[in-house]
Amino acid sequence: GDWTKAVHSALAKPSSRPGWIYGPFPSPFSTAVAYDNLIAVASGIGITPSVSAIINLSESRKVHLIWMCRDADLVEFYLTNVKFDDDAWTFIFYTGKRQLVLGERPKNPRIKVCFGRPDLEELVISLVDNTFHGKRMPQQLMDRCHLAEAKIYNKNPTERFCDALERAMTSYSLAEMYSIALDKTEAVDGKPPENISISGFAAMVRAVCSMDAAMSDDELKDYFLAVDTSGDGAVDRREFDAVIDSLRRKHESILGETVAAQESELETPTYIHGRSKAGLREAQTDELKELIDGWQIMYCGGSAPVVKTLTTLNQKYDIPVKIESFSW
């Protein structure tokens, strides 16, 4: 067929020897269709099969997500581009150092972002109890999420810009940023500019920070003029470095501010008539069987502690656990 012909043509040199192709290797996530309630657990780039499960299965079943990730770019990309399950919980535990740049708060109130790592066993148990008969999610966890989200989302445009600048500086050096600003500065008497103008500086900021309306031109102009010691409306490399340093110090002062946790409106417990009130930890044999019926946990990632915790959950409560590792 076409595929085997393509494989043959990809050989470094023609050969008539037999070739062996192993597979297919179905993902452990492929068993998800057999369950009504899913908990997708992921670390880092292991989010990929979890997102696939959410996109393809969330209309017919609940797909909860627990994602631990230190890559700010990954978190920003998926929160911006993926529609998570409206009827299930999505917990994202960010463990990186750079400030997240996320813009507006998600409209789905069940998407929660938290700093640090989760108590994974406690969270899984809470998801089962909350889904089964409306028990509250752990208050300490929700407080952690509220505090993190206040730091991430409750920002004015200037604060968001400072975060975006910090993000840009993970990809661009000061020399590269200065070069971009020079390229965007108007020519002087038909010659390439030696120093950058206010408009060149503003255009560079818009380009590298990818935030068109984060700060007004007047706000950027104030920072620019503060270090234009010559007062000629142009900034050399030394002055440019001072502009960036001024903005970064503004960013650091923002990070030092204290914000208060907010109250959630989703935490009112409800009791579903006819179901046991016993939580997963307290349930006896028959109650436990009813609680875990239709549940499966799926994990993709390379974290041995996560695998250990999920294995323990399987042994304690007999919840089916499928693990997809990176060690293929």
Image (spheres, grey):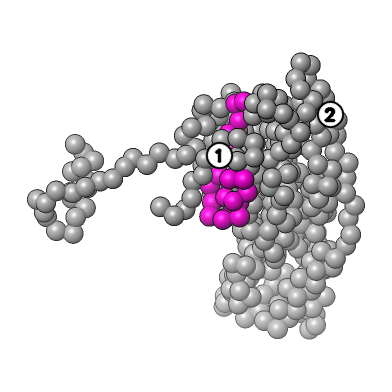
> Where does the magenta region start and end?
293-312
* Image location of residue 50, percent across then percent down: 55, 41
* Image location of residue 231, percent across then percent down: 80, 80
Residue at (78, 20) in percent of width and height: 272
Q: CA distance from mark 2 to mark 1?
A: 27 Å
Q: Nearer the viewer, residue 30 or 80?
A: 30
Membership of 102 in magenta stretch? no
- Name the image quarter holding residue 88: top right
Q: Can see residue 57?
A: yes
- SS class, disc 1: strand
Residue at (64, 36) in percent of width and height: 317
Q: Is residue 177 above or below residue 59?
A: below
Residue at (60, 77) in percent of width and height: 175
Q: Is residue 237 above or below residue 52?
A: below
Identify the amino acid type marked 2: Pro
The mark found on residue 321 in the picture is 1
Q: Residue furthest front?
A: 285
Q: Can see residue 186?
A: no
Residue assigned mark 2:
269
Q: Is residue 147 left or right of residue 83?
A: right
